[in-house]
Image: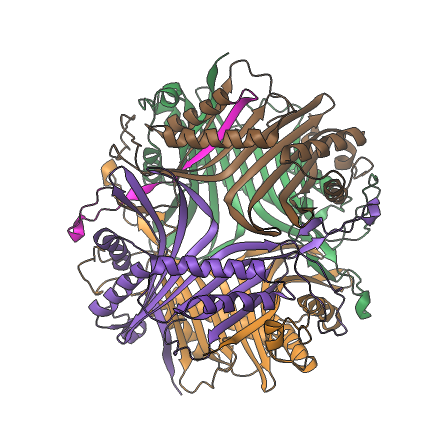
Chain colours: A brown, B purple, C orange, D green
Amino acid sequence: MGIVLGANQYGKAETRLVRVTRDGGTHTLTDLNVSVSLAGDLVDAHLSGDNGHVLPTDTQKNTVYAFARRHGVTSVEAFGLLLARHFVASQEPIHAVRVRLESYSWTRLGPHSFQRDGAEVRTATVTCDRSGATVVSGVTDLVLLNSTGSEFVGYRQDGYTTLAPATDRILATAVTARWRHASADGDWDASYAAVRSALVSGFVETYSRSLQQTLYAMGERVLTERPDVVEVRMSMPNRHHFAVDLTPFGLDNPNEVFYAADRPYGLIEGTVLRDDAPAAGLAWW
Amino acid sequence: MGIVLGANQYGKAETRLVRVTRDGGTHTLTDLNVSVSLAGDLVDAHLSGDNGHVLPTDTQKNTVYAFARRHGVTSVEAFGLLLARHFVASQEPIHAVRVRLESYSWTRLGPHSFQRDGAEVRTATVTCDRSGATVVSGVTDLVLLNSTGSEFVGYRQDGYTTLAPATDRILATAVTARWRHASADGDWDASYAAVRSALVSGFVETYSRSLQQTLYAMGERVLTERPDVVEVRMSMPNRHHFAVDLTPFGLDNPNEVFYAADRPYGLIEGTVLRDDAPAAGLAWW
Amino acid sequence: MGIVLGANQYGKAETRLVRVTRDGGTHTLTDLNVSVSLAGDLVDAHLSGDNGHVLPTDTQKNTVYAFARRHGVTSVEAFGLLLARHFVASQEPIHAVRVRLESYSWTRLGPHSFQRDGAEVRTATVTCDRSGATVVSGVTDLVLLNSTGSEFVGYRQDGYTTLAPATDRILATAVTARWRHASADGDWDASYAAVRSALVSGFVETYSRSLQQTLYAMGERVLTERPDVVEVRMSMPNRHHFAVDLTPFGLDNPNEVFYAADRPYGLIEGTVLRDDAPAAGLAWW
Amino acid sequence: MGIVLGANQYGKAETRLVRVTRDGGTHTLTDLNVSVSLAGDLVDAHLSGDNGHVLPTDTQKNTVYAFARRHGVTSVEAFGLLLARHFVASQEPIHAVRVRLESYSWTRLGPHSFQRDGAEVRTATVTCDRSGATVVSGVTDLVLLNSTGSEFVGYRQDGYTTLAPATDRILATAVTARWRHASADGDWDASYAAVRSALVSGFVETYSRSLQQTLYAMGERVLTERPDVVEVRMSMPNRHHFAVDLTPFGLDNPNEVFYAADRPYGLIEGTVLRDDAPAAGLAWW
């Protein structure tokens, strides 16, 4: 019996990059959070502290900033591909790279003035090894609510079940979705806008018998509308809104007054994919 | 020498209320966080544990929900006034009440579907005693950025000063502003929209020699445009964006690539008011 | 009627300083978060953007680090006094200074190894003007719980009261306390340890008829035991623990199984002071 | 080509349970956060909204509380096993269960008084299907620091490398570790204490040439000392402490004054395991 090193990776996390592009007096703004992870021949680093194969995380940070100047940032996916391919191509001991990016959106207020939008964040994860690259796009903290058009009935019961069936309830969630692309070429901004729209309309237009059903409808709509996407993974907390019992005060409550609870919450996680989706490889690393 | 009870208050904080109004098939949504504080004749409660003057915080929570059903919620200011006046009028031992409210905004996606907007939060603080009520409206986490039109030069220097003058820099902040109204009557939603707009345009349209100057310009604009407002208090962190030195990589950086820092940060706080503003009374409690 | 500048201040917030002292092979560690605010003759800075009276916040940060090297850090109070007096003495346009400090504690694991302790944070606020300095010490996020020895009965009721009296309940809170010292000289570490101990024993040893009563008992104990302290201000959320109703499952619940709720929560705030306490001056700025 | 449901699960997350055990006048306290996930035959729930196989998440919450009363909580691992086995055994459509638990520790202050300890959290993940159960124990937010005994030299360099070698630096991290047990029987509290101790002493006693080396040393020590553990997974951010350049102020800085940075940070993740470790099965779900 021996003790061995298993899967491992390292890198610089959360490099905060703001890129201004000046087109005459009109500026555009890109606001990113970039995290790099490298994996490869790193046994000596772990066992003996020999750092000969270790490109410093500080260098990774520098590369993010230098690439932003040299190449610009057209989309999180494209910028992630540039970075991931660079590390795989230039660092012989490194066999696989993952770049995770978050993009914060701003609304234009003037030629060089901006207001930060909400909690919703566009994400991308690019993975790359010697055989090629994969791209996963995503969104997180997209908070949606239907104030009706949702029920929860006909569920399984046991001796610990006290929940009453609900034929009309609020359905609210904070969507985290990630979707895998068929290829590493794409019109990333157009694709993002279309997928986001499909997720939102899937939520809005589905009469919901459960959050599971809504999740599936959202994923299915993405795959139906976007041939470039082969798989969607979603995580959706059920942000419970409980109708308050106002009868002690002589008041009815026809689903108008709700308590928005923090914890606990239901958590629904699921995958919708094509039955002929190619193997995922490193995509979900 | 004796030991005595000084200023004190108690109440229920952060009652999360979601109010749905159903106008046929079209719903409207109000999403609030309500915190109540009561002050008055509470010496016995503190010294002997006699709770005869203590209305339970649980009752305060119930009142929030019941009032939302009975009266609806037209604005945070109006709802706060209803609650504050109720407690002062109905609880003889209570002499002063403060109600703080946060309102989270949602964008309509359909007749009964909504998406939560960003971090920006509308706030109100209503205070009330036997002599009347005061209203302070506000906004928090309004994040603004100018990518040029900002400098910082000509500052005082001492032996610990190493900062180089900046003739062109990013100016970014998260505005927290609160403004005191001349009276407790108002068209609260219209006033809020106008003040918010004045704050934003004050930020966007001011060539900034310092964040202090920008702060004052924003407050001055509110007071100039809104006769119903007599005082504005602002807190604005300087969210530093540092241009990255790319010369080690053979690259220039004409204010295009920035590191967005977390801490430390400048913090600018100031008040702009009318020289004939009435006494503030309980307003800033 | 004119528009004027009111109260204002500015400074560098949250400078994170870790100070290692090497006594041979044995190190000691001080881990601080320092926030400076300056006030004075800053009208021109606000009205015309003339920065001649503005010492950059970057310089304030440099001063924190340089003073840590030059003078060391013996306690948050002493270090805050050094900084506050320096700015008042050296910056003619600055008339008043506030330095807020947080200290994070670490447990020794070896001669130069440490483990960060919990959420509890020691704080200090030092204020200074030309007439002298005041010191307020404090603690925050000190989380305490009594699993019995607490009741809540005999409270005021109205038409919105549904709460049942509790003769045996959990009492839990996260104490934020700040106490004002009679003078700016003190044995700060010894004083802190004694006050903290008085707060804790006041919580533990008081049979509680309400959180208000417990708060007062804690403050009174501090003032009784520490002649150097003249005023204590406390803010204590009531972290509700609700006994779960297990009767649907054929089980009783003799105060053994609780749901720890997040929001809403009671919030109790109060002051205990000597009736001959000197005027507070800038202390609570 | 068709669209299909892939991996999915659902459950109640973050049920906050506080369990008091009364042994005469001396109480003990257990403070948990419990998250349940169920997987199985849930296609109809997703595709048609048929909830016949869906045990409500509300029922799962009830079960947590009822089991706490009926069986008590001896350790997070044992309580997780009880819950996981219950759902697999009693819910025919459910084929696999994961229970994640966090335990917050409290220090005794008296017979029924407690103070919450720090950020460090004990964790467990229990997974179970018809073939058996696996147990993964863990710790998170264990913050450790060596003020010397750490270097970083001899690393790989490229055109983006500007980092200077460090022969004496602060090494600080917040350890998240999870370790897989060989069997689902164990003296869980004793095992936890021993593994935690091995992790800490591995950090303290290793002269560090890199955080990777320290990580491996910590994991190796756990496996050497604990035959019941077959695999350790760790995630350790490098909490950078940068020595401040004080030369502009005429001061040296012999590694005594540091700036504790927030972002970006290095992130080191790795696995140490036995070469004959049994297959992991559901353990890392």
- Left or right of residue A38: residue B35: left
Q: Residue at x 36, y 52 (%)?
A: B32
Against B176, residue C136 (above or below) is: below
- In the rendered image, which quarter is residue A144 located in? top left
Foreground pick, B23 / A264: B23
Q: Is residue A47 visible?
A: yes
- Left or right of residue C61: residue A139: left
Picture quarter with the N terminus of chain C: bottom left
Against A134, residue C70 (above or below) is: below
Foreground pick, B164 / C224: B164
Foreground pick, D16 / C262: C262
Q: Is residue D284 visible?
A: no
In the picture as drawn, the residue positioned furthest to the left comes out as A250
Against A28, residue B204 (above or below) is: below
**Image location (x, y in percent) of residue B162:** 76, 66
Foreground pick, A6 / D107: A6
Magenta residue check for C272: no
- In the rendered image, which quarter is residue A129 located in? top right
- Left or right of residue D281: residue D24: left
**Image location (x, y in percent) of residue D134:** 50, 28
Q: Which residues are magenta?
A: A226-254
**Image location (x, y in percent) of residue A72:** 71, 39
**Image location (x, y in percent) of residue A249:** 17, 53
- Left or right of residue A219: residue C14: right
